Amino acid sequence: MHGIFITFEGIEGSGKSTLINNVAAALRRAGQDPLITREPGGTSLGVALRKVLLNPEMEKLGSMAELMLFAADRAQHVSQVILPALEAGQIVLCDRYSDATIAYQGHGRGIPLDVITAIDNYARSEAIPHMTILLDLPAETGLTRARTRNKKSMDSSESRIDEEEMAFHQRVREGYLMLADQEPDRFLVLDAREKPDRMAGLVMDGFRSRFPDAV
Ligand SMILES: Nc1ncnc2c1ncn2[C@@H]1O[C@H](COP(=O)(O)OP(=O)(O)O)[C@@H](O)[C@H]1O
Ligand SMILES: [Mg+2]
């Protein structure tokens, strides 16, 4: 595998989609052709699963069913999209990945972490991120931003997550920070209240220092 696999993590509204687009633009200016993808939803199966997972009208999904649907999305995404791109030498930028499963289904919903890692290890197989950007933000700020964004775009597809209580999002944030503490070499933790341009610059600095031969 010659490619570089970078994941973007953080609570709702932390700015992942914004940052991923800015980083992709910076990489393109440096002569790269990055692939932008996301979970759930990076394949046609994933698009269908995303509708189920984020649909507020869907009957309340049990935590285990939810975990299995995310795992199905990941397995398909890894085999159909991520591994082929890495094998072709591409830089893959993925909006949410395994750390989100641990933070949301583990720290958020309370599924034991060893159950999650066992399932996730099968789902992701060899696709292990080389670098993970964590956008850290108080839960309240993130939810306020996400609500404003959803009102503007009339997009209610993410409302299932938005409607969950603040305490859940605080646990998710803490879970992410614990993961970053455990693997400081893989993680780059950014204050998500910084200006978008500055954050993209910090990601590019971190990228260049980790992969000096890539750009
Ligand atoms: N660094 C930032 N500072 C202030 N607002 C931001 C920043 N990054 C993104 N936003 C805004 O916050 C909202 C959520 O950003 P988005 O990128 O959609 O977050 P996510 O993908 O993590 O849910 C959007 O309206 C976006 O324009
Ligand atoms: Mg987003």
Image (spheres, rainbow, N blue to C red):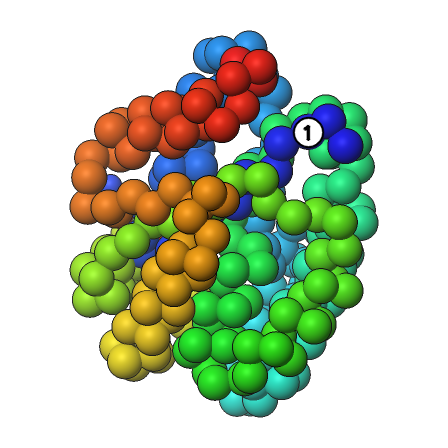
Image quadrant where one finds the N terminus: top right
Q: Is residue 83 left or right of residue 199?
A: right
The image quadrant that residue 188 belongs to is top left
Residue positioned 42% across, 48% down in the render: 184
Residue positioned 76% across, 41% down in the render: 83
User: Which residue is identified by label 1?
Assistant: 3
Q: Position of residue 102 (x, y in %)?
A: 52, 69
Amino acid type shown at disc 1: Gly
Q: Position of residue 63 (x, y in %)?
A: 56, 85
Q: Nearer the viewer, residue 144 or 168?
A: 168
Q: Position of residue 169 (x, y in %)?
A: 32, 72
Residue positioned 38% across, 37% down in the render: 19
Can residue 196 be seen here? The reply is yes
Q: Nearer the viewer, residue 59 or 154?
A: 59
The answer to whether residue 150 is above or below residue 114 is: above
How many marks the image carries: the answer is 1
Q: Is residue 208 left or right of residue 128?
A: left
Residue positioned 44% across, 58% down in the render: 182
The answer to whether residue 143 is above or below residue 91 is: below
Q: What kind of element bears circle 1?
A: loop
Q: Nearer the viewer, residue 185 or 2?
A: 185
Q: Is residue 191 left or right of residue 80?
A: left
The image quadrant that residue 12 belongs to is bottom left
Can residue 69 be seen here? The reply is no
